[in-house]
């Protein structure tokens, strides 16, 4: 069995306030040694994720901007990918709308709802709202598909969502912002398509692990065999009802690290023996489930 990890970034691998992954070093190293791919599945942009991957000296496929696309680096594990198009050094499978389409919609509603997207903000504004560095804020503003935004009166979000739906868009919520995204995209759909590509290209079957903390991770967690929910920084959990959901004990990189080490340990153990543990039960239960598209989806 091959393990495949899909991980949210902000508030999950990265701590909420300072975006640190220090406490996750052991888990990251363990995945690297065992050659277990970790696919960053985030609302962050391609440039932001490329920056993080460079820092971590890794090159894996990734899913930016809330499931808008899947990027497979050229030559990755000699995979054959049937769909998708070539862009710079990637094969890209696009699920979302384009940023210019999203921005046209933002223009049409921004006065009425008093909302501001990243496209309406200066680099300094983004820096102040996110706590990112100047350079990171520039990379966060360089967008291809979706728009994070703030809205003056959050009670009007449902009204905005209705109008967005009539125009082919939808809303989701991350740790800091609302996001306007294409109606055909979510993290879960991208995760399922990505899993399918790994499944076609690897022998021995795939077990997927997903980690997330917010509402925009629900579809991700529903699309994996082993869903792991991390608490928010204040210790509360997003309300998510998924069978077999594992709740991490600590938020951010600490919770991520403990959960990853436990999953990998349990997988190794269940390979060697057939020890009866929660994780090996989950693996046992889910690995027989087919078809792929139907995994955990309810
Ligand atoms: Mg998050």
Image (cartoon, rainbow, N blue to C red):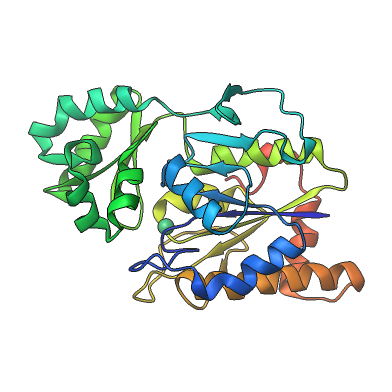
Q: Which sits in the foreground, 166 or 1?
A: 1
Quarter the N terminus occupies: bottom right
Q: Which sits in the foreground, 291 or 194?
A: 194
Quadrant of the rendered image containing residue 164: top left
Q: Where is residue 102 in the image (x, y as percent from the top left)?
A: 30, 27
Q: Which residue is drawn at 37% across and 66% down?
A: 16
Report if residue 254 is visible in the image: yes
Q: Which residue is drawn at 70% across and 68% down?
A: 30
Q: Position of residue 139 (x, y in %)?
A: 36, 44
262 shown above or below 90: below
Taking the image as four quarters, which one is ligand 1 found in?
A: bottom left
Quarter the C terminus occupies: top right
Q: Which sits in the foreground, 107 or 14?
A: 14
Q: Residue at x 27, y 53 (%)?
A: 134
Report if residue 42 is visible in the image: no
Tell me: 51 left or right of 73. left
Q: Residue at x 42, y 49 (%)?
A: 216
State the count of labels.
0
Tell me: 166 left or right of 292. left
Q: Where is residue 149 in the image (x, y as percent from the top left)?
A: 24, 43
Q: Where is residue 223 in the image (x, y as percent from the top left)?
A: 60, 47
């Amino acid at each position: 069995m091959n393990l495949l990890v899909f991980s949210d970034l902000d508030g999950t691998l990265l701590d909420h306030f300072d975006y640190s992954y220090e406490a996750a070093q052991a888990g990251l190293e363990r995945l690297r040694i065992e050659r277990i791919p970790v696919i960053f599945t985030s609302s962050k942009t391609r440039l932001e994720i490329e920056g993080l991957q460079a820092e971590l000296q890794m090159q894996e496929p990734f899913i930016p901007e809330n499931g808008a696309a899947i990027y497979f680096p050229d030559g990755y594990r000699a995979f054959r990918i049937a769909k998708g198009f070539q862009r710079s050094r990637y094969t890209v499978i696009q699920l979302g709308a384009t940023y210019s389409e999203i921005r046209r919609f933002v223009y049409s509603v921004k006065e009425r709802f008093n909302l501001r997207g990243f496209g309406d903000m200066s680099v300094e504004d983004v820096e102040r709202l996110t706590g990112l560095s100047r350079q990171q804020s520039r990379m966060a503003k360089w967008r291809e598909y979706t728009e994070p935004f703030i809205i003056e009166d959050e009670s009007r979000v449902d009204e905005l969502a209705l109008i967005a739906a009539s125009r082919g868009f939808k809303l989701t919520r991350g740790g800091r912002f609302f996001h306007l995204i294409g109606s055909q995209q979510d993290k879960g759909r991208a995760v399922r398509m990505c899993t399918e590509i790994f499944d076609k290209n690897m022998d021995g079957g795939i077990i997927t692990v997903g980690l997330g903390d917010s509402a925009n991770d629900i579809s991700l967690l529903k699309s994996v065999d082993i869903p792991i929910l991390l608490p928010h920084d204040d210790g509360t959990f997003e309300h998510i009802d998924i069978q077999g959901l594992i709740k991490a004990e600590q938020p951010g990189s600490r919770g991520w690290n403990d959960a990853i080490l436990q999953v990998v340990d349990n997988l190794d153990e269940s390979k060697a023996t057939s020890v009866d543990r929660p994780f090996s039960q989950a693996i046992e239960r889910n690995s027989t489930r087919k078809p792929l598209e139907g995994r955990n989806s309810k």
